[in-house]
Image (spheres, rainbow, N blue to C red):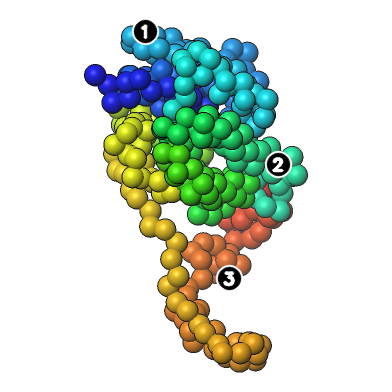
């Protein structure tokens, strides 16, 4: 008996990485799976063959049930068709896992409008569009629903990823709003900050060194280690199960062999006035009250650069003498 016997799950971004690990693990626990992927690389460029079919074959070879669906998660039409396909094929739709995403890293001063729009569209609208149609079904049934959206620790402010960070924090607000709206229909909604070595993380400095050295990329050697994408899946199974009916509107981190629950934002200090604030008074009061003890963000400031005998060329910090810049990240 599986933990998810009788349940039907739709998993976006199910072709590779954490999406595939999620789809395969849900199926191993008895869920029937619609593995959904557009078939693009990490930057959103079309692949010659959509690897989502490999995910389906893995599930079927292990004795599970799954079908593939091709479509854009940010498309309202494709999203309606995907949820409809699950219902038409299996009679219901119980679990929606949103993992699909792309990367377009760039420092804020170098980012283009398209780079911003594409990332926010795929990650944030790519959660809204499928959830809208899943929610219609869940509201009609009033029996069971589970939404889990993959956010990221980047939501807390990753430099060089303003589009990605904004979209991922948007997912947090989205899942909390959905949790509050759908609780009356026996639906839970949560956000996950996952961690693993995938094709997205293969873009870092360690990966560039591996390419230069001709050694395997981190994602290719992650199996069985703390960086294995499958490490995230057990938590997803629990949150998708009936046992998690009391868990909603929460943020979890599932990185490696450590799981974490984030505390909701809280007010840590209050400053009151019995009249309209006077600016002079506020300038005198704020440093002694709300902002007392606050330290600058960690990182390289202009003073740090000068003290380290380094120079800025075209927005890049370079050690030693000035050299030509290749532009921002």
The residue drawn where x is 45% and y is 44% is 184
Considering the numbered disc 2 on the image, is that residue within a helix, a strand or a loop?
helix
Does 162 sit left or right of 295 as displayed?
A: right
Instruction: Return the mark for residue 136.
Output: none
Q: Which residue is mark 3?
A: 303
Q: Residues within 10 Å of mark 2 (few under 14, many from 20)?
A: few
Task: Give the image location of residue 33, x and y in percent.
Answer: 44, 19
Task: Give the image location of residue 164, x and y in percent.
Answer: 59, 44
Q: Earlier in the sequence, mark 2 or mark 3?
A: 2
Instruction: Give the quadrant of residue 234.
Output: top left
Instruction: Give the quadrant of residue 64.
Output: top left
Q: Residues within 10 Å of mark 1 (few under 14, many from 20)?
A: few
Do callouts 1 and 3 mark residues in contact (Cβ within 8 Å)? Answer: no
Residue sitting nearer the eye, 276 or 134: 134
Q: Is residue 273 visible?
A: yes
Query: What is the quadrant of the N terminus in the image?
Result: top left
Q: Which residue is mark 1?
A: 61
The residue drawn where x is 50% and y is 54% is 156
Q: Which residue is mark 2?
A: 117
Q: Is residue 201 visible?
A: no
Task: Give the image location of residue 50, x and y in percent.
Answer: 57, 15
């Amino acid at each position: 008996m599986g933990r998810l016997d009788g349940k039907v799950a739709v998993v976006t971004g199910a072709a590779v990485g954490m999406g595939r690990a999620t789809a395969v693990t849900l199926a191993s626990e008895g869920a029937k799976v619609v593995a959904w992927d557009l078939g693009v690389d990490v930057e959103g460029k079309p692949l010659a063959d959509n690897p989502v079919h490999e995910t389906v074959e893995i599930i079927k070879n292990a004795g599970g049930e799954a079908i593939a669906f091709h479509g854009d998660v940010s498309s309202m039409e494709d999203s309606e068709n995907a949820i409809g396909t699950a219902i038409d094929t299996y009679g219901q739709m119980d679990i929606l896992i949103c993992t699909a995403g792309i990367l377009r890293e760039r420092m804020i001063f170098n980012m283009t409008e398209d780079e911003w729009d594409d990332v926010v569209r795929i990650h944030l609208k790519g959660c809204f569009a499928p959830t809208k149609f899943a929610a219609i079904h869940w509201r009609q049934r009033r029996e069971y629903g589970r939404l889990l959206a993959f956010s990221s620790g980047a939501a807390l402010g990753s430099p060089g990823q303003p589009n990605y960070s904004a979209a991922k924090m948007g997912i947090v607000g989205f899942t909390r709003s959905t949790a509050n709206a759908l609780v009356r229909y026996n639906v839970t909604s949560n956000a996950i900050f996952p961690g693993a070595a995938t094709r997205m993380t293969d873009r870092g400095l360690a990966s560039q060194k591996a390419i230069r050295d001709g050694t395997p990329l981190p994602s290719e050697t992650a199996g069985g280690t703390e960086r294995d994408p499958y490490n995230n899946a057990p938590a997803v199974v629990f949150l998708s199960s009936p046992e998690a009916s009391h868990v909603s509107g929460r943020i979890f981190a599932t990185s490696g062999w450590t799981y974490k629950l984030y505390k909701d934002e809280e007010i840590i200090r209050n400053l009151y006035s019995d009249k309209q604030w006077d600016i002079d008074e506020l300038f005198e009061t704020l440093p002694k009250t709300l902002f007392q003890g606050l330290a600058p963000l960690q990182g390289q400031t202009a003073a740090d650069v000068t003290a380290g005998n380094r120079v800025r060329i075209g927005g890049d910090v370079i050690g030693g003498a000035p050299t030509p810049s290749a532009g921002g990240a």
